[in-house]
Image: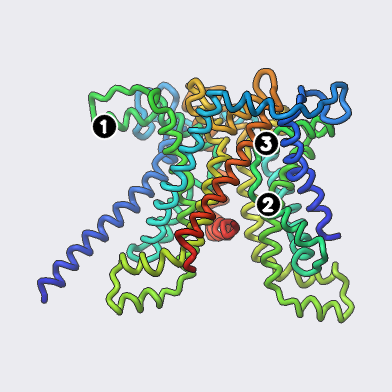
Amino acid sequence: MANITDKRSISSKIGLFFTYLVLFAFTLLALYPLVWLFLNSFKTTTEFQLNRLGFPKKWTTLNYSYAWVKGHFPTMIMNSVIYTGITTVMTLIFSFMGGFAFAKIKNKATPILYGSFVIGLLLTLQSIMVPLFLMANWMHLYNTRLGILIPYIGIAMPMGIYLGTEYIKSIPNALVESARIDGATYFRIFHSIIVPMAAPVGTTVAILTVTGTWNEFMLINILTSKESLKSLPVGVQKFASALSSDFGKQFASLVIGLIPMLAFYGAFHKEITKGVSAGAVKG
Amino acid sequence: MLVLPGFLIYFMVLAFPTVVSILLSVSNFKGGQLFGGKNPWKIVGFYKYKVLFRDPYFYMALKNNMWIVLISVFGQIPLGFILAYILYRGIVKAADFFQSMIFMPSVISTVVIGILWSAFFSPRGAYPELIKLFKPDYVYQGSVNHPMIPVLFVILWMYTGNYLIIFIANLQKIDSSVIEAAKIDGASEMQALRYIILPALSGVIVTSAILAISGSLKSFDLIYVMTAGGPAHQTSVLSVYMYDKAFINAPDYPMANAISTVMIVISFALIGLTKLAEKKFGGRE
């Protein structure tokens, strides 16, 4: 009997060891490239060529000061903050409004309208890229902030409306109805009942919009050619690809591009993971 | 009334352009003003599609897209599931730490990831050096023979964490007392997995598959940044090919829109197939 338990505990110990090994391997895989990038951004390019894997022998921040100024990163970061901020706020407002209407004030058109948003979840950006570009030109919105913001808000809309509607549906009808009977206007109901109660889904929508908009690259790349309107990802791409072999400076620009999102992840990682799983419940 | 502003923007940005895109794909539009311009365009039929279906580069891009779909559905999802399962069963300590580390690549900008990895895999990057640590006589050939392999690897690296999170969230919804009860009745870990957990997750697995499929067809940023479809179209995917047609050299808008229409059709077809597969094999919720 003792023999059997012994065997079992040994095999489970080996199992445990392998489980840890797998997890550590994946963690290492996730971290190593980032650490490598970070270390090398402090090397001069000459040192990098001689010593590609190790720690820098002489830490230099020259790469950063060069990239910061030459890459126009202060402007790019500012632009990214503006685009992400406005898109997120507008998406939140519109999703709550739309969600409220779809969930609580139904009429004949509701299923069709709501259905058209849900289909939007499956549409791909590529399919609208060319028309959007042509329309932006036609409406003279090419190379303007507005011309970037409108598509951004529109793209975030289906997910926002979908999550908003599904969540607001779970708020009891009785609440809305009794407020109605007491003479509250829809605006007042929206303002004092729906918005506070739907705050949790608001966080999810906000998180998904922020990560999506901040990292967006393709649309802004075609909707603007002005240096002063570009966002951080576009800036990093432009700067880094112009320096294809000057790894030190290139890496410094990548780290600059990396840090805002990592900080955001560090601050909100619980909410972000919740948002990702909530966003996946569709389908 | 409340829906109106969101609705207007949505239609302007998504629904209307989709229709325009399909129309353009069968037109003779040559650039210039979209509406009321000097050269009005008209519908000329499916000519562009005929050209497209004879284009060898189109099939190259399509094949690469299919590779990405395969690696997403049969790589990311199983890996994500296994990792999620390990963390969920509480076999190891510090599950939160592992979870946040493995998910981290998903939040980083694709542009940064693309450039980072192309530097990593470049002949002057870290990858050849790392191999040399194990095989001193290794001579790096570059990835000329299989240029898609690094791309696929990065896709796996980036998105596995996403599915890990999705699976963990849904595993946590399963009533753990059911599993404990099964254990007490003598079920092994594998049996619990097979008869309790997998059936309970079948819906999520299908959803993940749909996400993976539509995500893989969309993939643009990463490849555009890493390889821009090169060398010689070998890593091109439909979206990059479309971008080339529309914005590089002489724009061929109808052709670009024909490609994007084909992409939509393929994605709906694959999603339909997934749903069919679910009906046939799953549906025991």
Is A211 rendered above or below residue A251?
below
How packed is label 2: few (under 14 Cα within 10 Å), some, or many (20 or more)?
A: few
SS category of the residue bearing label 3: helix
The image shows residue A2 at horizontal and vertical percentages of 11, 75
Q: Pointers 2 and 3 in contact (CB under 8 A)?
A: no
Residue at 58% over, 58% down: A275
Residue A70 visible in the shown view: no
Subunit under mark 1: B
Quick check: can you spot residue B46? yes
Whether residue B143 sits left or right of residue B110 in the image: it is left
Residue type at tag 1: Leu
Q: Amino acid at mark 3?
A: Leu
Subunit ID for the residue under disc 3 = A
Q: Are marks 1 and 3 in contact (CB under 8 Å)?
A: no
Per the model, the C-alpha gap separating discs 1 and 3 is 42 Å
Which amino acid type is marked by label 2?
Ile
Mark toward the viewer: 2 or 3 = 2
Q: Which residue is mark 2?
A: A119
State how far apart marks 2 and 1 are (Cα): 51 Å
Which quarter of the figure is the C terminus of chain A placed in?
A: bottom right
Front disc: 1 or 3: 3
Residue A5 numbered mark, or none: none
Q: Circle 1 sits in a helix, a strand or a loop, which is it?
A: helix
Q: Residue at x 53, y 56 (%)?
A: B207
Q: For the residues tagged 2 and 1, is the chain the same?
A: no
Q: Where does the image place residue A121, in percent across and percent down from the top left?
A: 65, 51
- Which label number is shown at residue B133? 1
Mark sitting on residue A219: 3
